[in-house]
Amino acid sequence: MSLRFHEIAESRHRILNPITDDKLDLLGEICRFAPGTRILDLACGKGELLSRWAASYGVQGVGVDISQVFLDAARTRADELGVAGQVKFVEADAAAYEDTAKSYDVVSCIGATWIGGGLEGTLSLMRRWLRPNGIVLVGECYWTSPPPAEACTSLGVEKDAFTSLIGTADRAEHAGFELLEMVLASPDSWDRYVAGQWWTISDWLRENPDDPDVPAMRDFLAQARRSHLEYGRDYLGWGVFVLRAM
């Protein structure tokens, strides 16, 4: 899906992944942040993680994303929560972002491991900014059971792009990280994430009948609904994994 399609489909979302508000708060509790903790959030979307944790725990941080639309929303959210002085949002390719090495207590990438070509590559990328004994938060899909070939085709992913839950832990370990904790999405939170996009896209199609992207967006909507209902709910899980370098 193109960046513009993401910006349209998720225009009404505040959190751009299947985690819920309650579970984002739970993840913050699990991580036991101290005031002044420095977080680098790669592919930060609308910055909800950084701004909410800045408000709740006094963390400081930088969010990096390629979407100016999402970054504008992130800055607005930081203003709403009164934390604009604690967080900064940078328009950049997360894979090519440059910053001081080993300068963050936490490095997160919640649902965008494509920046490093998969989980292991993304963990390698994240390590460069991580202080000794720091933690990594990575959002990743996993197969809840082995998917048939037609499921992978419908969902638009290669079978080996993801693995089982234990396979995900093994991939993290192979990359040099220990699994400390995890917060997993539920089928219901998957529904809220993807089905919320369906309504948003449907409204956009009605409101923008002359837009040149209408045919492609209509096709995307139809395929997204079918793939989730037919295969996604049965085979695809998602979670945030809390890791520490070994």
Image (cartoon, helix red, strand yellow):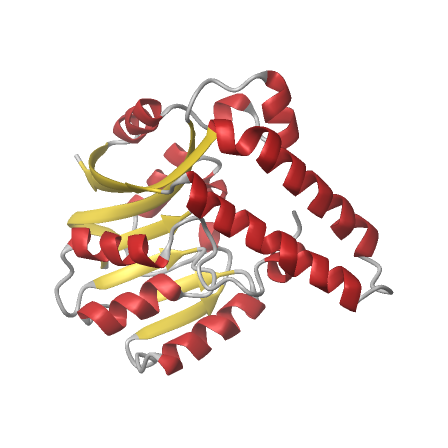
Q: Quadrant of the C terminus?
A: top left
**Does residue 102 appear in the picture of this structure?**
no
Picture residue at 18% right of the left edge, 64% below the top: 37
In this picture, residue 49 sits left or right of residue 132: right
Residue 9 lies, in percent from the top left, at 62, 57
Residue placed furthest toward the front? 188
In this picture, residue 107 sits left or right of residue 214: left
**Does residue 226 appear in the picture of this structure?**
yes
Residue 17 lies, in percent from the top left, at 45, 51
Task: Using the image, determine if residue 124 lies above or below residue 164.
Answer: below
Residue in front for this viewpoint, 246 or 48 = 48
Picture residue at 51% right of the left edge, 74% below the top: 72
In this picture, residue 149 sits left or right of residue 147: right
Picture residue at 70% right of the left edge, 39% below the top: 223
Residue in front for this viewpoint, 147 or 4 = 147
Residue placed furthest toward the right? 210
Answer with the quarter of the image where residue 122 lies: top left
Residue 77 lies, in percent from the top left, at 41, 75
Task: Using the image, determine if residue 32 lies above or below residue 137.
Answer: below
Tag count: 0
Picture residue at 54% right of the left edge, 33% below the top: 232
Answer with the quarter of the image where residue 227 lies: top right
Residue in front for this viewpoint, 33 or 239 = 239
Task: Using the image, determine if residue 72 lies above or below residue 17.
Answer: below
